[in-house]
Each structure stands twice: as structure tokens, then as C-alpha cells.
Image: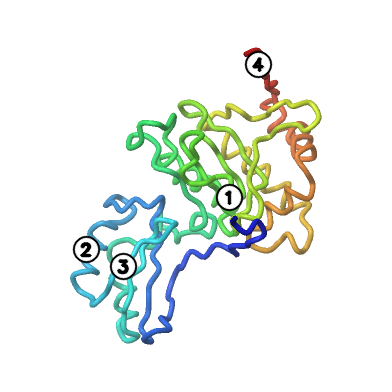
Amino acid sequence: MPDQNHDYGDRSLHSAWIEQESNGLYTCGVYIENGRIIDGPDGNLKKMARYLMDNYPIILFTTPNQDLLFSNIPDEMRGRFEEDMKRFGYGSRNGKSYSTLRLLSGACVGRDTCRLTYTDSEKFEPFLLDELEVKWGGMAESIGITGCERQCFRPATKTIGWVGSAFNMYQLKLMGTEDGRHQGRHLKDPKTGEIYLRMVKRQDVGMITDVLFEFYTANRLPDESRPGGMGYFHSRIGMEAIISHLKENPRTAKLMKPMKVVVNTRL
């Protein structure tokens, strides 16, 4: 039987430079937004990866978070390696360095790659973060977006999860933590069984996320200010308090129309 009390610990993204204990060489952890290695206006990642593999004595790995690890880099090559990555546009979007919020967030592939998804989760995520990081770029929390209820990017283990429910529509999940100690849940009132924010329009996702970040930063306890602490904040105050705040906030009140869960008991 598996150990029910086993704790996997905090999530490590293996970013930036890591010294290899085995041989004193270095690994460079490279962030790849949504795991998509492409050439585009914000960087030629495909050409970059090919160039680095051809010009450095390295071994390439991928991480569970869909980032890249370029390993076995000698210390004296690290500076040149960083400069070569910058030449291909790595490290910035829209002329700005990757924010903490962007580095911690991500999405599943969505359309047009997956035939199961309802919506464009991967295409939506970069633009949602463009909107949010103006104010919340330094927030050490994670946003997980997925195109359907199969939840391939595991939004239930992110601070805020958005689950595709129809084309350009998302359902909100809260109370998750990246360490896996808490799993995210839909906004369901424990007393009435009513569910909220089941079909949120794409254009309202950023606004609701902004309201949630404001609520957290204004009411968190000191130990909930650590990276990833927002999920613990949500678990402490409970679902009723979250729903109540969203109903009272003038920006989200109009969206808080409940849906009743109906269970068919007939066989």
C-alpha cells in the first residue's frame, strides 16, 4: 500500500545555473513557455536550441515542467552561453524580462494540437500574463490553464487554476498548492451546493485573477506571504469566505450567478 503521509516536497523548476555535484560542471535551466520550442517575434527558441547543441559540449534534457536543461557546461563557457541565448531573444517578452509569475505559470497545449480540448489554453496564457504582470509580475504564485476537464497542466496544483469549459470559457479552481499538499477545487458553496464561475468568458479571467490577488495581499498572514502561500491562505479562510468576497466586490459581483448541481438518482 502507498504511504498516505508521504510528502513529495516543494516543486523545483531547476531554473538558471546549477552546479553538478558529480563533476563540477554546470547545468543551465532554460524556461520554455508552455513547453513550446518555436521561432517567433519574442525569440527564436528553435534556432537557439540547435545552435547551442552544435556549439557547446552539452547534453540536453527536458524537465517535468516542459523546460530545458543544458548540462555539462564548463564554468568558463557560462558567460558566452548566456550571451548566445540572448542573441536569439531568450529571456524576454515584449521587450521585458520574464516575470516571476510567468516563470511559475503555464498551460496545456489546447487547440489546435489536442482534439479533446474546448479552448485555446496555450494561446491564451501568454496574453493573460501580459495583462497580469504589469501589476503582479513579481508575485511568486502560479496560474495553471487547461483546455478541458482532463487538466493536463494540473491546474489543481496551482495557486489559481482555469479549466476550459467551452470555447473561450473557463471555470475557476482555487485552494491548490504547488507542493501537492492541497488540491484545487471548484467554487462550490458547502452549504447550498451552488457552483460559481463555471463559465467565465476569456476577457474576464484577468479581472477575476486581479481581484483574487488583491484579496490575498490585503488579508494574508505573515507565513502566507512566502512563495506559494496563496493556496494556504485560501484553505485557511475557506470557500464560503472566497465566494462572499467575490459577491461583494463590485468588479466580480455581476459574474457570481450560481449554478445548482442536480443529481439524477433514478436508475
The tag earlier along the polypeptide, 1 or 3, is: 3
The tag earlier along the polypeptide, 2 or 4, is: 2
Tag 3: amino acid: Met
Whole-Å distance between the Cαs marked 2 and 1? 32 Å
Whole-Å distance between the Cαs marked 2 and 3? 11 Å
- How is this picture coloured? rainbow
| Residue drawn at 57 percent across, 40 percent down | 206
Tag 1: amino acid: Lys
What is the tally of numbered marks visible in this picture?
4
The answer to whether marks 4 and 1 mark residues whose Cβ atoms lie closer than 8 Å is no
Quadrant where the image shows the N terminus: bottom right
| Residue drawn at 69 percent across, 32 percent down | 252
Q: Say which element carries label 4.
A: loop
Which of these two is toward me, 32 or 132? Answer: 32
Taking the image as shown, residue 228 lies to the left or right of residue 52, namely right
The answer to whether marks 2 and 4 mark residues whose Cβ atoms lie closer than 8 Å is no
Report the disc number at residue 264.
4
* Above-or-below relation of 222 to 263: below
Residue annotated with mark 1:
158
The answer to whether marks 1 and 3 mark residues whose Cβ atoms lie closer than 8 Å is no
| Residue drawn at 29 percent across, 58 percent down | 45
Residue annotated with mark 2:
50
Taking the image as shown, residue 126 lies to the left or right of residue 5, namely left
Q: Say which element carries label 1.
A: loop
Where residue 23 appears, x then y in whole percent?
Answer: 36, 86
Tag 4: amino acid: Asn
Whole-Å distance between the Cαs marked 2 and 4? 56 Å
Q: Say which element carries label 3.
A: helix
